[in-house]
Image: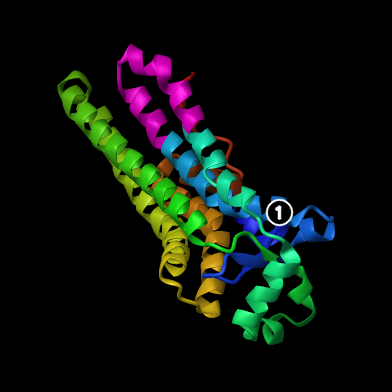
Amino acid sequence: MSLSMSFFIIPFMMLPALAGVPLGLLSKLHVPTSIQMYIAVTGPAFAGVSLLAVFENRYTLLGEKNGWRKIRFIYIVLNYLSALAVFVYPMSQIPDQEAARKDLIQSSPCFLQLLGSYTTSIFVITRSPMTTAIPMLIEMTLIISQVSLITVLIYQTLSHLKFRMSLNTYQMQQKFMKALSLQFILFITALGAPVGVFTFSMLFDGYDQGINNLCIIGLSLNGMISTVSMIFLHQPYREFLIGVITRNNKVGKCPDRSIAPF
């Protein structure tokens, strides 16, 4: 998602009007603007589902519920499909671009002065931002609620397993979950805040190009923030990076069961 926002697409968004100008590499390669905009709006949803999959994986590794293991693949696939499908309807409502651009410039003449020759490249996704704001809000709520529920289930499972594992193992699991929870908070701040601003901008019809640009920058930095937080919060990643930098060949290996098989 970060690469799409900062390199491949670089969308110049004009919210609350759900319109924008792609300035990235894909435009130079003449990829249809509709496809670029679809990637731009689904990227945050896919990033959220990816984080959900990390929490679900940890829950599966801790739990002993064979029934859940049988359906977890379907559960993850359904979440990815929901991220893929949530914006299908808004994208199916793409209006005639010439008429939509004309209406947009008439209602907001500042775009003509702001964009200059790029005005002809404006792509209007829909005339009714609500058709995108509502699905965006629903998808964001679904992901946050699922991650919160799985986090509660993980802590419940840990409390049940407390007397069946060594004190050292229990403390390691607790430490890992605290780091993962903090990483989730950082993720919500870096991803959820811009998406939330976009959503409420469309819902309440508020326009501030500076805030729009800052939100795109925030989404572009999400990958870097996630990577840096992972290195600082999780000791194995930190030790591996230090080992690579110092060329230390005695870097520990990850446990075989760090990922639950489907």
Question: Where is residue 213 drawn, in percent x and y?
Answer: 57, 73
Q: Residue at x 70, y 59 (%)?
A: 9
Please identify the dominant SS of the magenta region: helix
Question: Where is residue 12 drawn, in percent x and y?
Answer: 64, 69
Residue extending furthest toward the left: 163
Q: Secondary structure at mark 1?
A: helix
Q: Is residue 196 left or right of residue 240?
A: left
Can residue 131 be spotted in the picture? yes
Q: Is residue 155 magenta?
A: no
Rendered view: 53 above or below 5 = above
Q: Is residue 52 left or right of residue 28?
A: left
Q: Amino acid at mark 1?
A: Ser
Give, as a single range, the part of the protein colored magenta: 54-78
Q: Nearer the viewer, residue 127 or 61?
A: 127
Q: Nearer the viewer, residue 56 or 107?
A: 107
Please tell me how crowded label 1 is: few (under 14), some (14-19), or many (20+) other residues with Cα within 10 Å.
Answer: some
